[in-house]
Image (tube, rainbow, N blue to C red):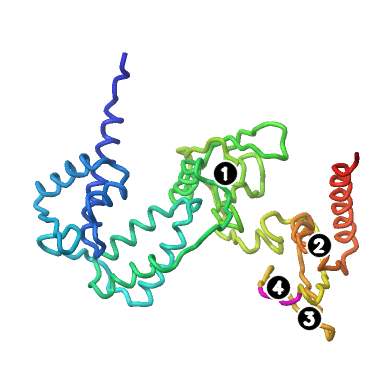
């Protein structure tokens, strides 16, 4: 027996259909050449469905035709949306941002692309071309971000919880805990750090906020209760001198000496806000940092094995030696007969 559709389901489907029809209209307003096949692929619908939606546009008084010489649809008239007169530099910046957000694991990417398409439709042809050329020529590839594709609902819940000032409830699964934990949270911020999205939030039973990796939530939903966020909360103060995400309880002065061949590579990047560089007469280079905690910087130092010497602190040097010894022992076992 087929499941009866509810009024809520019907309204949601109607809203999605209308959003698609409006999206088709905005695409036709732009300068890009749109064929039935390309439009159907853009909105992931069948061409037969596309034709039905375009008849809705015609019924609403939006006339268009397929120009064979042009190779795409053209509108009978070209209305312009009310939008600020953006400068070429501003349009270029928007195009670059839209290109960057096409990385599949940056969840807002599709929305940014839709906004860019609307801006393009509202600009004069020569300015619209700046947006389209930027997206066509500028690409962001292989950021190696954590896979958030299965967690868009959780990310969206966190975003709206922040915007609406509401508490969140969810189940969090950490590799450092034996079982999932139920949480009731006051969200403070969402941040993208290195390879993943993180939620800064205070649990109902704690006095201070903590950092939660968003793709570790098994569920997350908005509650009706208002969240309480200190007005003086500052993200920079919260992270302090953490190497990346998690701030340790103790501050350390780090001194690392890199070999001559590693010197030009390691100095190409500013790895930390406290970084200082001293170039040695023999071509080597010394980097110093002020870091809260050693656990995160440890793995970065190990990635330079054979090209770096830990001058200080001794604790970090011992941690590096311990991990390297574990690696040697683990791989020697494979060579034993």
Q: Quadrant of residue 294?
A: bottom right
Q: Residues within 10 Å of mark 1 (few under 14, many from 20)?
A: many
x and y, in percent, of residue 98 in the image? 41, 62
Question: Could you tell me how far apart the alpha carbons at marks 2 and 1 are, in whole angstroms?
Answer: 30 Å
In the image, which is nearer the foreground, mark 2 or mark 1? 2
Residue at x 26% of width, y 31% of height: 10
The answer to whether 210 is drawn above or below residue 292 in the figure is above
The answer to whether 107 is drawn above or below residue 4 in the figure is below
Query: Does residue 264 belong to the magenta stretch?
Result: yes
From the viewer's side, name the closer residue of 265 and 13. Answer: 265
The C terminus, quarter of image: top right
At mark 1, the secondary structure is helix
* Residue ID for mark 2: 305
- Asked if the residues shown at circle 3 and circle 2 are in contact, with their CB atoms under 8 angstroms apart, the answer is no
Which badge, 3 or 4, is on the more N-terminal residue? 4
Q: Residue furthest bottom?
A: 281
At mark 3, the secondary structure is strand
- Asked if the residues shown at circle 1 and circle 4 are in contact, with their CB atoms under 8 angstroms apart, the answer is no
Tell me the chief SS of the magenta region: helix
Q: Residues within 10 Å of mark 3 (few under 14, many from 20)?
A: few
x and y, in percent, of residue 126 in the image? 26, 75
Q: Which mark is residue 215?
A: 1
311 lies left or right of 123: right
Which badge, 2 or 4, is on the more N-terminal residue? 4
- For the magenta stretch, what is the residue range? 263-268
């Amino acid at each position: 027996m087929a499941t009866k559709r509810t009024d809520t389901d019907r309204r949601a489907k109607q809203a999605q259909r209308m959003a698609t029809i409006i999206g088709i209209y905005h695409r036709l307003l732009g300068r890009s050449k749109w064929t039935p096949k390309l439009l159907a692929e853009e909105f992931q619908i069948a061409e037969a469905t596309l034709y039905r939606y375009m008849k809705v546009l015609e019924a609403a008084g939006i006339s268009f035709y397929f120009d064979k010489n042009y190779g795409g649809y053209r509108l009978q008239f070209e209305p312009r949306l009310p939008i600020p007169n953006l400068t070429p530099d501003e349009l270029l910046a928007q195009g670059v941002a839209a290109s960057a957000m096409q990385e599949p694991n940056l969840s807002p990417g599709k929305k940014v692309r839709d906004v860019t398409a609307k801006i393009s439709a509202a600009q004069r042809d020569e300015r619209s071309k700046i947006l389209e050329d930027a997206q066509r020529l500028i690409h962001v590839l292989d950021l190696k971000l954590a896979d958030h594709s299965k967690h868009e609902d959780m990310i969206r819940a966190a975003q709206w919880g922040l915007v609406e000032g509401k508490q969140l409830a969810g189940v969090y699964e950490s590799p450092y805990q034996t079982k999932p934990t139920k949480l009731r949270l006051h969200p403070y911020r969402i941040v993208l750090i290195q390879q993943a999205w993180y939620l800064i939030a205070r649990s109902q039973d704690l006095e201070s906020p903590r950092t939660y990796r968003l793709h570790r939530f098994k569920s997350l939903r908005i509650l009706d209760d208002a969240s309480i966020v200190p007005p003086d909360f500052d993200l920079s103060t919260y992270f302090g001198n953490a190497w990346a995400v998690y701030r340790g309880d103790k501050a350390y002065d780090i001194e690392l000496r890199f070999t001559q061949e590693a010197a030009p590579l390691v100095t190409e990047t500013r790895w930390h806000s406290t970084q200082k560089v001293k170039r040695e007469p023999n071509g080597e280079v010394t980097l110093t940092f002020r870091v809260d905690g050693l656990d995160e910087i440890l793995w970065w130092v190990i990635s330079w094995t054979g090209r770096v010497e830990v001058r200080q602190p001794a604790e970090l040097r011992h941690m590096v030696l311990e991990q390297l010894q574990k690696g040697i022992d683990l791989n020697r076992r494979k060579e034993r007969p």
